[in-house]
Image (cartoon, rainbow, N blue to C red):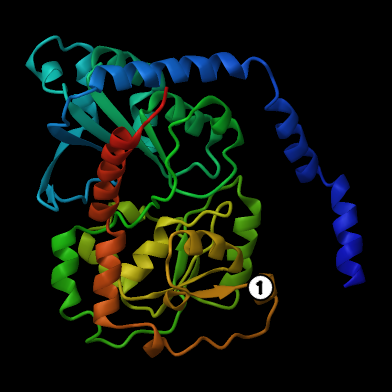
Amino acid sequence: MSQIYSMAFAAWENKVVAAQNQLVSALQEENLFPLAYQKAIALKDKRARMQGRQIARVVLLIGPPNLACASDVIDGQRFEKVDTDAFIGLLADEGSFLESFKDTLVILTNNILARIHPQRFAAIAAKTPYTLYAIHDYDNHHWHEMSLQCGLLADAYFPAHLGDFGLLGRVAANIIPGVPCGSIQWTKPFLEKKLETLFDQPRQPGPLGMHNFYSKFTHRNQVIQTLSQRFPKVGFSTDRDFHALTEEEKWQEWTQYDYHLVVPVNNDLPIRFFDALISGGVPLIPENLRVQTDFLNIPRDWYVTYGADFLLSPGLEFPNTSTFRSQSLTAKTVELFHIDHIIADIKCLVCDHRTNDQSA
């Protein structure tokens, strides 16, 4: 224990701690207030314009893989898919297409915003004053410049991961937490059909853990590299694009294994956690992610955790998956975490936020 204390005291000199302290100081800068003021005025003006108006249409901006697997009708509500390039065409449109976005809720992700470009998106938003924009940010744990743009440009901003909202909290009052990424790999009808025979075939224990390689996330890369020495199906997918596979190809890969290793980029609860659940597998996640799963009310017996000691342990006994896996449990996770449910949650939360807003 004394060694831990000495290491903790030494951490005061750590450059990470210094950077965190610098961030706290930077958040005191006066130039952040004009941003906060302008955002507050914009939100107030939007509330005033939309007062008494009903959302008549919900549009999803799609660009595979983001939102492309969503259903056209969810809980009786039609969700209209509009290609991102067609939406960009609003900049040049002065006719019926532009008019059709009146009294519309538009849902998009941070990746779609990046594809449109924030400056172009701002110009479109200015042309659609009776449109509400909700942005689901999959990357608020690391893509901070884009998260700032999302928070400033959205009417409702949904960060997918718990984190430090110090900067966004200073300049935007439209943050709605608690909506995770969910699973975006398969359509709902595809999953419902596969559930019928989900556990007919035996699975290998695994774990399966093929991750994309990101050069700047060296700690994550080291964890994956270390575990790849012990587990043959853990490593980097350097020779293919997983998103380019068909639904069936993805399903065949994920349902071959009981356990699915999750190595986050930066304390995030990534999409692969939800992919594992809805394909009948057991996510294997770092212990520190329990703060996020607990926040989302995900039962602890739906997944298994590992600590830093796991990386250096010569062996590990995985629990018997019969205590985790069942067709009814998998069906429940599909209802909770498929992208359809995530989108429906966003729509409901935007409507509730409008109804309950008592801002001066």
Along the viewing direction, whichever of 240 and 324 lies nearer the viewer: 324
Q: Is residue 317 above or below residue 153?
A: below
Secondary structure, mark 1, is helix
Work out which quarter of the rendered image holds the C terminus and state it: top left
Give the left or right position of residue 303, taking residue 326 as reference.
right
Q: Quadrant of residue 166?
A: top right
> Horizontal and vertical percent for residue 206?
45, 80
> Horizontal and vertical percent for residue 287?
59, 68
Give the left or right position of residue 318, taking residue 121 as reference.
right
> Horizontal and vertical percent for residue 353?
33, 37
Q: Residue at x 23, y 53 (%)?
A: 340
Q: Residue at x 68, y 70 (%)?
A: 308
Q: Amino acid at mark 1?
A: Leu
Q: Is residue 313 above or below residue 44?
A: below
Look at mark 1 in the image and give the residue it sits on. 311
Kindly tell me whether residue 44 is visible in this rendering: yes
> Horizontal and vertical percent for residue 222?
64, 60
Q: Residue at x 76, y 32 (%)?
A: 22
Residue count near mark 1 (Cα–Cα under 10 Å), binned few <14, some 14–19, many ≥20: some
Along the viewing direction, whichever of 324 and 186 lies nearer the viewer: 324
* Total numbered badges shown on the rendered structure: 1
Q: Residue at x 31, y 60 (%)?
A: 337
Q: Quadrant of residue 256?
A: bottom left
